[in-house]
Image (tube, grey):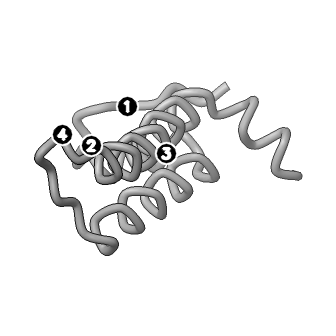
Amino acid sequence: MNIKQRVLRNWITTIFGTLLMFAALAMLIANRIPSANVDFGWWEMVGTALLGWVFLMAKDSLLEGVFMGIFHVKEK
């Protein structure tokens, strides 16, 4: 299965991953604005971006493990 098929089939983790990637970008932008009064470190921004990449490339079944079995993904 190539990357495009995985992203399109597993849309729940794709949404989480995309939101985390945008959060990392927002952290970077907010860090550059002097009036924002925030001080995100590089480790925080890179960690958020990497976690977003993991969710972006993961299958939806990863959520079962993350939520300790509370959230069940229906297999097709």
* Measured Cα–Cα span from mark 3 to mark 4: 20 Å
Label 1: which secondary element: loop
Q: Earlier in the sequence, mark 3 or mark 4?
A: 3
Q: Amino acid at mark 3?
A: Met
Disc sitting over residue 69 in the figure: 2
> Which of these two is toward me, 5 or 18?
18
Q: Which residue is mark 3?
A: 21
Identify residue for label 4. Answer: 36
Within 10 angstroms of label 3, few (less than 14), some, or many (20 or more) residues?
Answer: many
Amino acid carrying label 4: it is Ala
Name the amino acid type tagged 1: His
* Label placed on residue 72: 1
Which of disc 2 and disc 3 is earlier in sequence?
3
Q: Residue at x 58, y 35 (%)?
A: 14
Residue at image position (46%, 30%) is 73
Q: Residues within 10 Å of mark 1 (few under 14, many from 20)?
A: some
Where is residue 13 shown, x and y percent of the image? 51, 37
Quadrant, the C terminus: top right
Distance CA(mark 3)–CA(mark 1): 24 Å
